Image: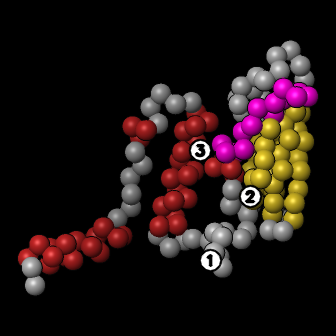
Amino acid sequence: MNKLLLAGLALFPLLATAQPRMPEEMLRGQNSQYQQGFRDGFREATRMMNGGGGGGGGGGQQWGLRIDSATYGAGPRRCDFTDGLAQRANGKTEYVLRVGNGLCGDPAPGRDKTAVVKYRCGRSNQTATIQEGDSEVLRCR
């Protein structure tokens, strides 16, 4: 057998079991909300690569929160924070959502705003409407 191939095979168990290191340089200059989302996503990807994937195959996890949509604002002046919330909350059994301009800016200056989050827990569709300044636990039971 080729010596290079043998060396590669000898290293494979080390690479397969090595714990990936988080690329901290990708977090520099980003806000804390971005950093937390990045860390949560990195941990989830590492867990999945190490055999801790979802149940049943086909569609990923079958349990935990699945964010369908998330908007924040007043009337027609709303911003969408679905992707960011999904990165942080999907797959968890509960997630505390604090509502404020940190979600996606201030889409309606001077007006009272709300967040509307539509999410699933298994086959159960749920909606949370949360006032600016309040928080709510999005929970799968």
Q: Is residue 75 magenta?
A: yes
The numbered mark at residue 66 is 2
72 to the left or right of 61 = right
Asked if the residue under mark 3 is in contact with the one under mark 2, i.e. CB atoms within 8 Å, the reply is no
Q: Which residues are magenta?
A: 72-85
Quadrant position of the N terminus in the picture: bottom left
For residue 37, which quarter of the picture? top right
What x and y, as percent, mark residue 74? Answer: 89, 27
Q: Residue at x 62, y 77 (%)?
A: 57
Disc 2 on helix, strand or loop?
strand
Q: Residue furthest top?
A: 110
The numbered mark at residue 57 is 1
Asked if the residue under mark 3 is in contact with the one under mark 1, i.e. CB atoms within 8 Å, the reply is no
- Local packing at callout 3 (Cα closer than 10 Å; few below 14, some 14-19, many 20+) is some
Q: Amino acid at mark 2?
A: Arg
Q: Is residue 109 magenta?
A: no
What x and y, as percent, mark residue 99? Answer: 79, 34
| Disc 3 target residue | 37
Identify the image's colour scheme: rainbow, by chain, secondary structure or one colour.
secondary structure
Can residue 98 be seen here? The reply is no
Viewer-nearest of discs 2 and 3: 2
- Local packing at callout 1 (Cα closer than 10 Å; few below 14, some 14-19, many 20+) is few
What is the spatial separation of the Cα atoms under label 2 and label 1, in whole angstroms?
Answer: 16 Å
